Amino acid sequence: MTITLSDDASRLQVDRIHSWLASSYWSPGIERALVERAIAGSHCLGAYRDDAQVAFARMITDHATFAWLADVWVDESVRGQGLGRRMVGWFLDHPSFAGLRRIGLVTADAHGVYAGLGFHPLVRADRYMERLAPGLADQLRTAP
């Protein structure tokens, strides 16, 4: 089974991506329109087996100093084969992201995958802050 990676936006299967993200722990129930806006503002990567999309990831960046890796999703049918690691590596090796000073991400369950690619806990966590949409803080506190 060959799985190919592509950042050709015309290949993205938005219905499938929306379904995955709406069922995720980090964006449960997300509206399709919001997924479409997120895709439009990001450098997206799809993984495809034949013509079916089997994984997705996106990077948000200024292309100079900072990027944020988000929405890494691998379909259950191909999990455990290193595809998530391969997709993140694709971004890390891509010329558009070379020389960035910082790439951030959030994960609840893939620390080992990301650690193997050079990610680590925040060096100065006391300096980081965030502003959340109304109600999101409560949602995050109660999420598994």
Image (spheres, helix red, strand yellow):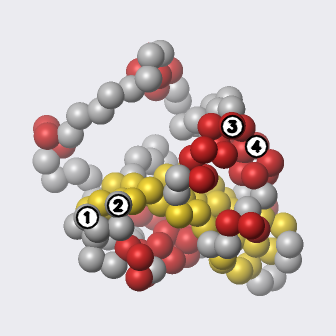
Q: Residues within 10 Å of mark 2 (few under 14, many from 20)?
A: few
What whole-number distance in Å separates the C-alpha atoms at marks 3 and 4? 12 Å
With respect to residue 142, does 30 lie above or below? below
With respect to residue 96, does 18 lie above or below? above
Q: Which residue is mark 3?
A: 33
Amino acid on which the number 4 mark rests in the picture: Ser
Amino acid on which the number 2 mark rests in the picture: Asp
Tags 3 and 1 touching, CB below 8 Å: no
Residue 119: x %, y % from top left: 32, 63
Tags 2 and 1 touching, CB below 8 Å: yes
Query: Regarding mark 1 in the picture, which secondary structure is present there?
Result: loop
Q: Nearer the viewer, residue 64 or 144?
A: 64
Residue 17: x %, y % from top left: 72, 51
Residue 65, label in figure = 1
Give the quarter of the image for residue 77.
bottom right
Amino acid on which the number 1 mark rests in the picture: Thr
Residue 42, label in figure = none
Give the quarter of the image for residue 21.
top right
Q: Residue at x 29, y 33 (%)?
A: 130
Q: Which residue is mark 2?
A: 62
Q: Residues within 10 Å of mark 4 (few under 14, many from 20)?
A: some
What whole-number distance in Å separates the C-alpha atoms at marks 2 and 1? 7 Å
Q: Which residue is mark 4?
A: 19
Q: Upstream in the sequence, badge 4 or badge 1?
A: 4
Q: Upstream in the sequence, badge 3 or badge 2?
A: 3
Q: Nearer the viewer, residue 87 or 31?
A: 31
Q: Is residue 57 left or right of residue 3?
A: left
Q: Upstream in the sequence, badge 3 or badge 1?
A: 3
What whole-number distance in Å separates the C-alpha atoms at marks 4 and 1? 32 Å
Residue 20: x %, y % from top left: 71, 46
Q: Residue at x 20, y 40 (%)?
A: 128
